[in-house]
Amino acid sequence: MASQFKGMKVAAALIGFIMIMVGLFLIFVPLYIIPLFSGVVAVSGAVLIAKYLAAKDTRNGWDLITGIMHIIFGAIMLTGDVGTRALGVLSIEWVLSIWILFAGVLSIGNSLALKKSGNKGWGWALLGSILSVIAGIIFIMFPIRSALVAPIIFGKLVGVSMMITGFTTLAVALSGKHAANEGDTQGAKE
């Protein structure tokens, strides 16, 4: 049991360290978010196809179709020429713009519902919702500029998020020794 725990602790520490390094890399070179995102999309497609193949009795054709489309999109974004990749980034930016706009509009309704229920944070939620709507409109109005700026901002945000998660994972892994000792002491007392 202790050796299993030690192996999990080392694996968690390694994952935390890798996340910190990838996060730092994305902060300083944020445009690499595009191939990273494309690779994740392609891998998620493979996972969806594997899920489809594994589910013999409950197969969902949408998993297969989505998986194939993910792999095609990821492969095109990873191997396509500059024009193809630029078109892919513009497509992602367009979909993201529409999503931000609609999410902002829906969040305004949610903010007003929070106000009705007496939640004191409704004003901050409303402000964030309005900013989302404005960002969505700006991204839609200026798609090329947004496509140039969004990967940089997104890359930096993902980098910071990965670093925070990495530090948290590393801290949990390093503090795990105390939890194992406490568990052994508990078992000895019983």
Image (tube, rainbow, N blue to C red):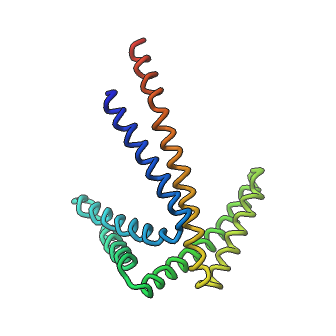
Quadrant where the image shows the N terminus: top left
**Above or below — where is 58 with respect to 180?**
below
Is residue 189 visible to us here? yes
Q: Looking at this view, is 132 or 39 the one in front?
A: 39
**Above or below — where is 95 with respect to 14?**
below
Q: Looking at this view, is 165 or 60 the one in front?
A: 165
Residue 50 locus on image (x, y percent): 27, 62
Residue 93 locus on image (x, y percent): 54, 78
Residue positioned 57% across, 64% down in the render: 156
- In the figure, residue 36 lies in which quadrant? bottom left
**Above or below — where is 148 with respect to 32?**
below
Residue 78 locus on image (x, y percent): 38, 75
Is residue 118 visible to us here? no
Residue 98 locus on image (x, y percent): 58, 77
Residue positioned 72% across, 55% down in the render: 114
- In the figure, residue 85 lies in which quadrant? bottom left
Q: Looking at this view, is 77 or 64 the one in front?
A: 77
Quadrant where the image shows the C terminus: top left
- In the figure, residue 81 lies in which quadrant? bottom left
